[in-house]
Image (tube, rainbow, N blue to C red):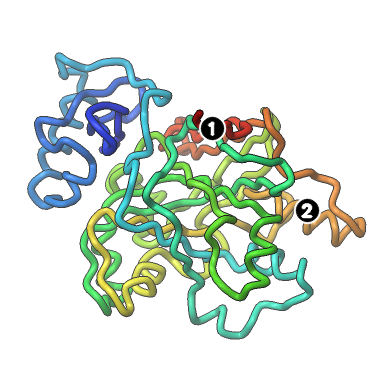
């Protein structure tokens, strides 16, 4: 099944079920008023949502309406937790080259995960807002999962059984702001703006062979201003799969249902497939020419992130965002 959240009825929105082809939808608030409410009682709510999905996909939902992703918030407009990893060695290797630092030996055994802000998450068609282009605005195409309750100390094997839904994400970074924050030897706060998520969150059974139990396989297609920027495969080069990332996050605490865990920017060693963030492209240009030639995002630029099935159909819908100058409220 595919689930989405309409901007309606409060900050957590209204839960809808979306058809497999992303063309129609039906209200699901009679089952659960929001996606978080469904996750809080997943064992009882999921079968009812799946049944409603079957009715919709069979064309028998009398109250179906046209699905419009521009009317949607993030599947979880706010979440109890957003724990974002950096699971692709190639991505970390390229970014660390900018500082002249090799990958540390522990990288191969101890995942990198940081605690992101989750009080306000962006919808797929919401703008990327920044006060200045000088902040080094960068996209970050990745995969994310939503989990059920995960007990403290859960093994990777146990964590795999707690994954409920899969989404795409655009984890926007302000590279120039991050560079200053890192000199403090502390975590990101100002350097990471609200992450955006695909219009729909998808159940594991809907992903078929693309989901192998721990990784999502398939090219993550990234366009900037209508030009193809990269198609790295989300399942290739992922050093730590999602069960390992979840187990790492739950080592010393439990994770509540509705927590989101991200893969980090999808990155493949083959430069021919392109990139899912500008920082990687700029690092490759520096290595080849002595300096980067690709600028960071500017106001008016548009980013599109999407994944397609073997038949060429969009699985999650597109993250389609314009970069805009933030205007504070009067």
Local crowd at mark 1 within 10 Å, few (<14), some, or many (≥20)?
some
Of circles 2 and 1, the one toward us is 1
Query: Which SS class for mark 2?
Result: helix
Evaluate if marks 2 and 1 touch, with contact meaning CB atoms under 8 Å apart.
Answer: no
Query: Is residue 145 among what the camera can see?
Result: yes
Q: Which mark is residue 204?
A: none
Q: Residue 304 location in percent, x, y?
A: 57, 34
Corner quadrant of residue 224: top right
Q: Residue at x 78, y 58 (%)?
A: 283
Nearest to the observer: residue 138 or residue 60 = 138
Where does the N terminus fall, quadrant-wise? top left
State whether residue 266 appears in this view: no
In the rendered view, does 206 fall on the left or right side of 181?
left
Q: CA distance from mark 2 to mark 1?
A: 23 Å
In which quadrant of the rendered view does residue 257 lie? bottom left
Mark with earlier residue (2, 1): 1
Quickly name the residue at label 2.
Answer: 282
For disc 2, the neighbor class at 10 Å (few under 14, some 14 to 19, many from 20) is many
Residue 74, compared with residue 97, is above or below; it is: above
């Amino acid at each position: 099944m595919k689930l989405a959240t309409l901007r309606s009825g409060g900050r957590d929105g209204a839960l809808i079920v979306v058809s497999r082809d992303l063309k129609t939808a039906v209200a699901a608030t009679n089952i659960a008023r929001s996606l978080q409410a469904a996750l809080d009682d997943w064992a009882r709510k999921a079968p009812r949502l799946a049944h409603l999905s079957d009715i919709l996909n069979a064309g028998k939902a009398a109250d179906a309406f046209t699905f419009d992703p521009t009317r949607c918030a993030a599947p979880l407009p706010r979440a109890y937790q957003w724990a974002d990893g950096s699971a692709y060695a190639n991505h970390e290797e390229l970014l660390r080259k900018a500082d002249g630092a090799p990958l540390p030996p522990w990288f191969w055994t101890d995942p990198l995960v940081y605690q992101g802000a989750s009080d306000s998450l962006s919808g797929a068609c919401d703008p990327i807002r920044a006060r200045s282009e000088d902040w080094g605005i960068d996209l970050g195409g990745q995969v994310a999962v939503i989990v059920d309750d995960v007990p403290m100390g859960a093994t990777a094997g146990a964590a795999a059984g707690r994954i409920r839904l899969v989404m795409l994400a655009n984890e926007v970074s302000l590279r120039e702001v991050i560079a200053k924050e890192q000199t403090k030897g502390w975590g990101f706060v100002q350097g990471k703006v609200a992450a955006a998520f695909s219009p729909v969150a998808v159940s594991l059974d809907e992903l078929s062979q693309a989901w192998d139990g721990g990784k999502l396989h398939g090219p993550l297609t990234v366009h900037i201003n209508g030009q193809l920027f990269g198609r790295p495969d989300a399942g290739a080069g992922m050093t730590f799969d999602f069960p390992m990332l979840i187990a790492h996050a739950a080592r010393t605490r439990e994770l509540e249902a509705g927590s989101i865990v991200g893969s980090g920017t999808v990155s493949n060693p083959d430069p021919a497939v392109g990139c899912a963030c500008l920082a990687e492209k700029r690092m490759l240009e520096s290595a080849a020419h002595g300096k980067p030639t690709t600028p960071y995002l500017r106001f008016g630029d548009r980013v599109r992130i999407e994944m397609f099935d073997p038949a060429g159909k969009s699985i999650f819908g597109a993250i389609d965002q314009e970069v805009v100058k933030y205007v504070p409220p009067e």
